[in-house]
Amino acid sequence: MVKLIAIPTREDMVDDHFGHCAYYTVVTLDEQNQVVKQERLDSPEGCGCKSNIASVMQEMGITLMLAGNMGMLI
């Protein structure tokens, strides 16, 4: 089974906040969990937490999104 994983990214590094990242790196893994493809999904303007990005990811077939934080930063 192929897996798609989204990773919040900024300047080619993992961004620790889902809603404030510059873009998402979408990694496709094959049945042996080997990376077979990597692509960029631009983040929506403003806060991703208040956008439809989760629905877009679901439509793309992404089943896992890695993030350290979600919601308002204080």
Image (cartoon, rainbow, N blue to C red):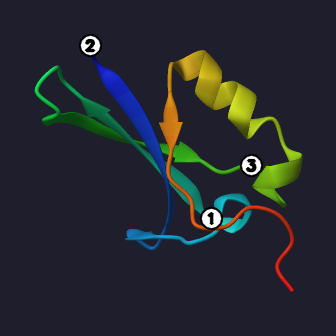
- How crowded pointer 2 is (Cα within 10 Å; few <14, some 14-19, many 20+) is rated as few
At a point 39% along the width and 30% down the height, the residue shown is 4
Distance from Cα at disc 3 to Cα at disc 2: 29 Å
At a point 24% along the width and 34% down the height, the residue shown is 37
At a point 82% along the width and 63% down the height, the residue shown is 71
| As drawn, 45 above or below 51 | below
User: What's the mark number on residue 44?
Assistant: 3
Q: Nearer the viewer, residue 66 or 25?
A: 66
**Element type where label 1 sits in the image:** loop
Q: Please state, as top left, top right, bottom left or bottom right, where the N terminus lies in the image.
A: top left
- Residue located beneath label 2 in the image: 1
- Residue located beneath label 1 in the image: 21
| As drawn, 18 above or below 43 | below
Q: Amino acid at mark 3?
A: Pro
Point out the tag, 3 or 2, that comes first from the N-terminus: 2
Point out the tag, 1 or 3, that comes first from the N-terminus: 1
